[in-house]
Each structure stands twice: as C-alpha cells, then as structure tokens.
Image (spheres, helix red, strand yellow):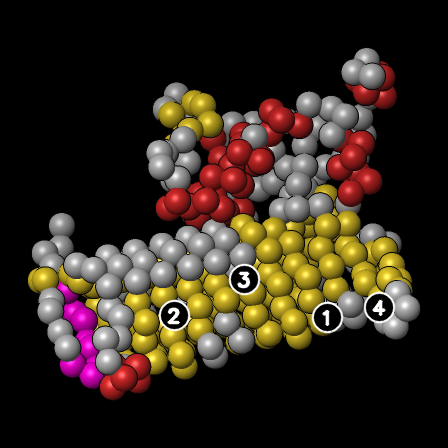
Amino acid sequence: MKEYKELRFNETNIQLKDNLVKGSILPEKISELNRTITIQENAIIEGPVYAHKLEIQNGEADIHGAVFTHLELYVNSEARGNVIFRKSVGSANTVISRAQECKLSFYSDINAKKISLCNAFVAGSIYGDEISLENCVVVGGVFATQTIDLNNCIVGTFNTPSITAAGSIYLLLPSAFSIEKINTPLTTKFYNLSLADLGSLYKGLPQDASSGKIEINIENDEIKTTLTDDEVQKSLRSYTVIGKVLAADLLDTDKFQNHFLLTAASLGSQLLKTYDIGMDVNGETAMLTSEKIRDFFFDVLYGKIEVNEMTGNFDISQITGKL
C-alpha cells in the first residue's frame, strides 16, 4: 500500500503529491478564494474541497468530500490511474476530462455550466448547459439546458433542447426526451436496456429468454407532444419503448434484478453496507460494489458482455394467467 504523508498548509496555491489531507481544503480568508489546487499524483483528501481551479495531473487521486470550483475542474489529458470523486462535484464554469487512459469515477452528481468527459463513470446525474460525453456511463440522467453530445455511451435517460449522438447509445430507462429532433449519422445505434437481464449478466449467468436489449428506431419510436398554456406552446419529443415495457411488466421482470442493481449503482458510496444479488457463475457471492458495477457497465458498453436482442414475443397465456 502506498504510504502517504500528512500535509498541513496555508499557501495560496497547493500542490499535492503522495499526500493525505486529513479534513477539508476550504478558504479561511479572502486571499484563499483564488487558490489553485493541483494534485500531481497519489493524493487522498478526506473532506470537502473549494478551489478557484482544481487540476489533476495524474492518479491515484481520491476525494471523499464534495468539490466546488469557481473556474474549472480539469483532469490532464495524459493522466493515468484511478481518479475518484465520492461526493457531489460542482463548478461555476467547467468540468473537463479528455483523458483516455484515466479511470475516472464520480459516485454522485455533477453540476456545471459546461461538462466534457471521456471514459468516465457517473453514478448520479449530470446537470449543465452544454454536456459532451464520449465513452461514458451515467447511471442517472443527463440534463442540459442547451445541448448534449453523446458518443458511444450508456445513460439512464436524457432531457435537452438539442442533442447529437454517434456510435452506440444505450438507455437504462424506458424514455428519453428532446425538443429538437436528434442529430445523428445513419450508423448510430440506439438501444434500450430496461428489459435486459442485467442481474444475470452481472453474475455471469445465462440471460432470461424473455429479456434483451430493444433497438430504438429514432423515426418510428419518436412521439411528438405539444404542450400549451395561455401564453406558451412547446413541442417535446420522446424516444420511448414504454409500450413494450408495459406489456413485459405483466410478466415477472423482478427476477432481472435491474432496479436493485441500478439503485445500488446510483447510491454509490452513500450505501452503509455492501449488498449482493446472489451467487455468480463461479458459486461466489456477487457483491454490488461501485468498482465492480463500473467495470460491468463498461464491459457492456465495449461489447465484452453481450446483451441479447429482445425478440418481442411472449405467450399471452402467461399474461392472462396473472390477471
């Protein structure tokens, strides 16, 4: 285990390397409001952080408290190793990471004007004006006031005026929303995982025959709704498989354990104990830890774990027998 040196400081700018910060890094006087905090490598901060700018040059970095920056939270593009934020992250301006080799994890929500992430896992939701995600997993929702740009991502849902999508996009919830039509090349694939047997996949067991991913046809599965009141009229487009989900919900979908898996993922480090979802293919207990859930969803995203296509067929007698 890496040995960390305890650090005490009162400088305007702080640099951390092989340091353990016992407590918070918060300004105590006006001159410290413009403080830049740089994590060079191998640092643990056990409390909350406020900085004018927070830069992470390299892992390992583990911040246990909430983080807020006035200007920017920036992860260096050459960063490697684990970078973990265990509580909420916010910025008055930007949160940016384009690091391809960094294992970046946010175990709660992110809120900033502009957010641009690559190879990141977000257990909560993302809120911003402009959001760009590449090769990312967001268990919660992606909510933008202006634009969203998705490239090869798994997200819970999204809601935005304008969205551009490329690669393979997977939704964990039945519906997603935009005001303008999705801007997407013909090669883009949309899938919904709300009826996939994620529990069995997580445990390495065979998938249920009635489960699977549902391909979304952006043209056919779009529902356009016009909302009006005395002063305003607004159109909203939803991309949904809710009809298929309502039919399938008459069957026993609890055995998929999707809700339990997603809830454990979204709560992240807030869980007071570690839960499991039974025995895996090796006869061992399948523990629901943040690290294992992260690896699982990225294996799905990159095709290492293959989700069956849902056939859309079911026996009507199975439904009538439950009514």
Quick check: marks 1 and 3 in contact, CB under 8 Å? no
Amino acid residing under circle 3: Ile
Quarter of the picture holding the C terminus: top right
Q: Is residue 219 visible?
A: no
Q: Which mark is residue 126?
A: 3
Badge 1 is on which residue? 161
Report if residue 181 is visible in the image: yes
Circle 4 residues within 10 Å: few <14, some 14–19, many ≥20: few
Q: Nearer the viewer, mark 1 or mark 2?
A: 2
Disc 1 element: loop
Closer to us: 169 or 8: 8
Which residue in the protein does label 4 denote? Answer: 234
Left of 155 or right of it: where is 222?
right
Q: Earlier in the sequence, mark 1 or mark 2?
A: 2
Question: Sequence order check: which comes first, mark 4 or mark 1?
Answer: 1
- Mark 3 nearby-residue class (10 Å; few <14, some 14–19, many ≥20): many
Cβ atoms under marks 2 and 3 closer than 8 Å? no
In the rendered view, does 88 fall on the left or right side of 320?
left
Where is residue 86 shown, x and y percent of the image? Answer: 36, 54
- Distance from Cα at disc 1 to Cα at disc 2: 26 Å
CA gap between label 4 and label 1 equals 11 Å
Disc number placed over residue 68 in the picture, else none: 2
Q: What is the x, y in percent for residue 82?
A: 31, 58
Q: Quadrant of residue 169?
A: bottom right
Residue closest to the eye, 49 or 201: 49
Mark 4 or mark 3: which is in front?
A: 4
State the SS at label 4.
strand
Q: Main secondary structure of the magenta part?
A: strand
> Disc 4 and disc 3: Cα gap in Å?
24 Å
Q: Earlier in the sequence, mark 1 or mark 3?
A: 3
Q: What residue is drawn where x is 9% and y is 62%?
A: 5
Tell me the crowding category of disc 2: few under 14, some 14 to 19, or many 20 or more residues within 10 angstroms, Cα based: many
